[in-house]
Image (tube, rainbow, N blue to C red):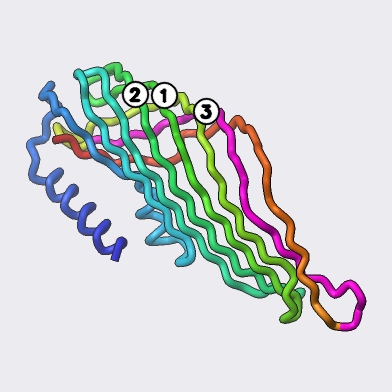
Amino acid sequence: MMKELLYYAVFLLLTTSAYAQDTTSATFYKHDVGFNTSFVLNSLFGTENSSSFDLMFKQQISPSRANRLGISLDYYTMNGTTVSGMQLDEIRFNLALTLGKEWQQTLSTRWRWYGGGDVVPRFRVVSQYVEHNNIPSQNTDTHVFGVSARPFLGIRFQINERLYVSTEASLSLGFNLHRGKNIDYLDENGDGRIEEIENEVNSFETFIRVTPASGIYFFYSF
């Protein structure tokens, strides 16, 4: 269903582009909405067990300054058996919000560079179940809560008065808090009786991550 809605949205935007006046006038639009096109590419050419979607809304405070609000959703599933007889079932779900500000500078009629900073709270759920030769081995359920600061630098190309594409690189500095449990299934006595050994997952990590300009955002101004 999400694929069909996305294809319709892309068709609508492209149709608007085809019939819109081919101009890059200085008309000031107060709102921009866009999505990362990697979702389209993954839907068309990626695996069926993975789905991600990034949506960004911008409120233009002035022709050179904007507030940003975004949401990122990612869902991944895997179910398979290796040659060694290991069965791995895995589910991952990620939700992240973006709250930030953006400053823009015109380079030419169609080109503009921009920079700014975001605050990104996130939530992730990871569930894994492992079997060896149809015998339970491990079961892990983890919840991750995190926040990061993300300065960014990007460039955009104006297709026409209302449509533009952009890409940006960023540096993320933040922390993650892991909570959950891990269950190991062991035959400690060698008599075929499986015992469950449960351990709590409780950890804290900090990170610095560089993200190159790889995804392309497609925006519509109104």
Q: Do the residues labelled 2 and 1 touch (CB within 8 Å)?
A: yes
| Quadrant position of residue 164 | top left
Which residue is depicted at the point 39% across and 27% down? 154
Q: Mark 1 to mark 3: distance in Å?
A: 10 Å
Which residue is depicted at the point 63% across and 32% down? 206
Q: Mark 2 to mark 1: distance in Å?
A: 6 Å
* Front disc: 2 or 3: 2
Dot 3, crowdedness within 10 Å: few (<14), some or many (≥20)?
some
Q: Which mark is residue 101?
A: 2
Region of the chain picked out in magenta, as a range: 164-191
Tell me the element at label 2: strand
Residue 171 within the magenta-colored segment of the rendering: yes
* Front disc: 1 or 3: 1
Q: Mark 3 points at which residue?
A: 171
Dot 2, crowdedness within 10 Å: few (<14), some or many (≥20)?
many
Tell me the element at label 1: strand
Give residue 59's position: percent from left, percent from top: 22, 29
Q: Do the residues labelled 1 and 3 touch (CB within 8 Å)?
A: no
Q: Mark 1 points at which residue?
A: 117
- Amino acid type, residue under disc 1 in the picture: Gly
- Amino acid type, residue under disc 3 in the picture: Leu
| Quadrant position of residue 66 | top left
Which residue is depicted at the point 18% across and 49% down? 14
- Amino acid type, residue under disc 2 in the picture: Lys
Task: Judge by depth and name the residue closer to the eye, 143 or 16.
Answer: 143
Give residue 146's position: percent from left, percent from top: 53, 38
Give residue 156's position: percent from left, percent from top: 31, 29
Identify the mark nearer the N-term, 2 or 3: 2
